[in-house]
Image: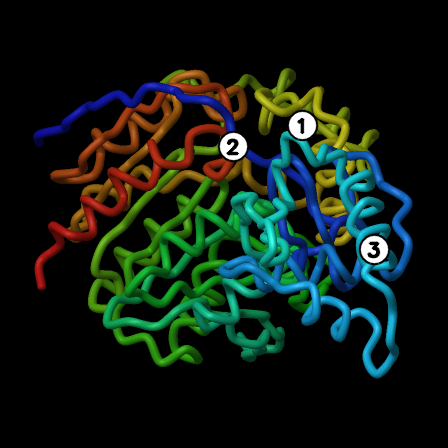
Amino acid sequence: MTVTARSAQTVCPARYPWYMSPPSANSYRFAGRTLDPVLRELRIGDVLRDVEPKVFDLIEYLLKNRERVVGKDELQEALWPGVIVTEASLSRTVMKARKALGDPAHEPEVIRTVPRKGFRFVANVRAPAASVFLAAGLSDVHFVRSGDVHIAWRTLGDGPQDIFFAPGFVSHLDFRYRIQEVADFDTQLAEGRRVITFDKRSVGLSDRIGRPPNLEDTVADMKAVLDAAGSKTAVIFAVSESGPAACQLATRYPDRVSALILFGTFAKGSQSDDYRHMPGAKLYQAWLDELIRNWGGPASLEFFAPSIADDPTAQDGWARYLRAAASPGIIRGILESLAEIDVRDCLSAIRCPTLVLHREGDRMIRVGAGRDLADRIPGAEFVSLSGPDHWWFVGDQQAVLEPVKLFMRNLPA
């Protein structure tokens, strides 16, 4: 077996803060500001600004026509259709817009006056995630029966190659793309491809079955979604708790799995004499008890994403996500079941190309678990990444995406 290790340097964190709502996925972001045309809100950083309706309309109109200079006559007609107003009224509205934006006329970052022509929105704008996904082809949420259970799934993008993304212990298909960093990551992953993802039974939009899903359930649900999506063969991209199920899927249905990408995951869910890469039973139980006690708040964010754990917006977003995704009782059962997982015996039977990625400072699952996983899969490539975050979308995304894209480009046709 040849295992290759590479390292990637950590760069600055994501440009925009991690959050879900508010603001919504329809927001435009520019120069440290956020304009949400659905909620009709303007923020500078995290601070909500008080904006008059006409002022908001002016900012929104210039933003949406930012590729050109907008003349004064056009602005007057757009803001006061069918009404004759003086140029002074427009000037006052522009002045109020600049004040609301914190954008001084003598050094404008956002609205620039073009002498004798009009006004131009000059800030670099990040388009709303919703618009990006509409352009990329985000499907509606669908449901497929897996046994007696309905499993929620959806797709993003279109192309000759399918990527089946298997999430960790919690997920929610509606909330997923309110996380800007997830939106950014999946949009890049879906370039020229189709990304398929789902909610496991008992979490997100899938049926709540009153008991935690086991490994057999997850494998069956993954196959059911692949069938429903009409995917003959797919690259399975599994993170965290889904890694063992992805490995089982690859050994049971080798004709359906063209390759495996495994991020921040493991082969065995608990520590033993011959497997020291996971926490001991007492330490794990203490962490789980603490997680459940804090459910509904930003539970264990310091372990999942330490680089943003002190960000109040991230804390609020994670708390909202947990409340929407699952109940504390179900999560306790899921994470207690995780300790019983052991797929080491099946790993030598995997025959598809496999990429294993793990961050060196991962506080949830030690990097040794990733190295061990790669050692047990014939021909697997191991990529060591810098950083402390367990979540693939937090921190330096490009360090994750670059080896993933290279790996997929080199797959057999």
Q: Which residue is found at the position 81% from the left and 61% from the top?
A: 87
For residue 382, above or below residue 213: above
Report the colour scheme: rainbow
Taking 345 as reference, is 70 above or below it?
below
- Expressed as whole percent of the image width and height from the top left, the position of residue 247 reads 33, 49
Mark 3 — residue? 55
- Neighbourhood count class around disc 1 (C-alpha, 10 Å): few under 14, some 14–19, many 20 upward: many
Q: Which residue is mark 2?
A: 14
Q: Secondary structure at mark 1?
A: helix
Type of amino acid under label 3: Val
Q: Quadrant of residue 308?
A: top right
Q: Mark 1 highlights which residue?
A: 301
Question: What amino acid does circle 2 point to?
Answer: Ala
Q: Is residue 349 left or right of residue 140?
A: left
In this rendering, would 323 be left or right of 172? right
Cα gap from disc 3 to disc 1, whole angstroms: 38 Å
Q: Amino acid at mark 1?
A: Leu
